[in-house]
Image (cartoon, coloured by chain):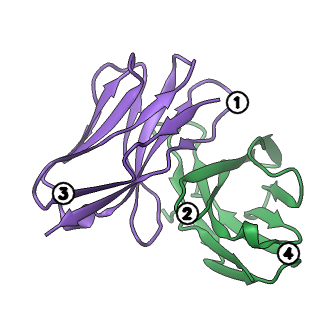
Amino acid sequence: AQTVTQSQPEMSVQEAETVTLSCTYDTSESDYYLFWYKQPPSRQMILVIRQEAYKQQNATENRFSVNFQKAAKSFSLKISDSQLGDAAMYFCAYRSAGGGADGLTFGKGTHLIIQP
Amino acid sequence: NAGVMQNPRHLVRRRGQEARLRCSPMKGHSHVYWYRQLPEEGLKFMVYLQKENIIDESGMPKERFSAEFPKEGPSILRIQQVVRGDSAAYFCASSPTSGDTHNEQFFGPGTRLTVL
């Protein structure tokens, strides 16, 4: 079974600074997808960014980018120019690309605090 | 295009009662997933359904929990004889069969179940 580990229960960053959230995972599969979801106090799960394991290029979405290290099974999220609206829980998630196991496996989350 | 709809948003039940949680996927989506989030935890996969079929129920507790996705109408997650440990947020997600976003899951706002 796959596991996802987020080793930082809480992170704090000054507004406009850059912060990196860590995520590692364990799998024996070679093809899979990785995601970062944001959960603000409203509890709505919002997709931030996704990465296909077969792609070497790191995904980028505006101020959000990932550092995907397949050999190290690491998938960190970098948020540049942090804004107050970025404050939320961030969850890293894994999904198999093979048939059958389509459910997402989530980490326990990192609580991101933005200091004004 | 309306997003994933869940109702009710909040549900209070006494121990021993039944809880019924509903999920209407996004228009054109035929895959539905249910997740449970305990306090201070990440989401845990419960079940994956397509119309009239349960595809993967590996995350469902063996007793008291059931799920369906009928040909017509919303998907239902049913919890019989609820206990205090069932108190959690239950999220539904949907995904399309094909297209650019077929590997993404779009989440509803969740139903927060409180068992007294």
Spatial CA span between label 3 and label 4: 44 Å
Residue B97 appears in view: yes
Whole-number angstrom distance, CA of label 4 to CA of label 2: 22 Å
Disc tally is: 4
* Dots 3 and 2 on the same chain: no
Whether residue B104 sits left or right of residue A76 in the image: it is: right
* Residue type, mark 4 in image: Glu
With A35 as the anchor, is B103 left or right in this view? right
Hey, what amino acid is under mark 2?
A: Gly
User: Which residue is at a point 57% across and 65% down the rendered structure image?
Assistant: B39
- The image quadrant that residue B66 belongs to is bottom right
Q: Colour of chain A?
A: purple
Against B46, residue A44 (above or below) is below
Indicate the secondary structure of the residue bearing disc 1.
loop
Q: Mark 1 lies on which chain?
A: A
Viewer-nearest of labels 1 and 3? Answer: 3
Q: Do labels 4 and 2 share a chain?
A: yes
- Amino acid under label 3? Val
Within 10 Å of the Cα at label 1, are there few (<14), some (14-19), or many (20+) other Cα atoms?
Answer: few
The crowd level at tag 3 (other Cα within 10 Å; few <14, some 14-19, many 20+) is some
- Residue identifier under label 1: A100
Q: Which of marks 1 and 3 is nearer the N terminus?
A: 3
Above or below residue B48? Residue B114 is below
| Left or right: where B56 falls relative to B81 | left
Element carrying mark 3: strand
Q: Name the residue under label 4.
A: B18
Residue B24 pos. (x, y %): 65, 63
Colour-to-chain, green = B
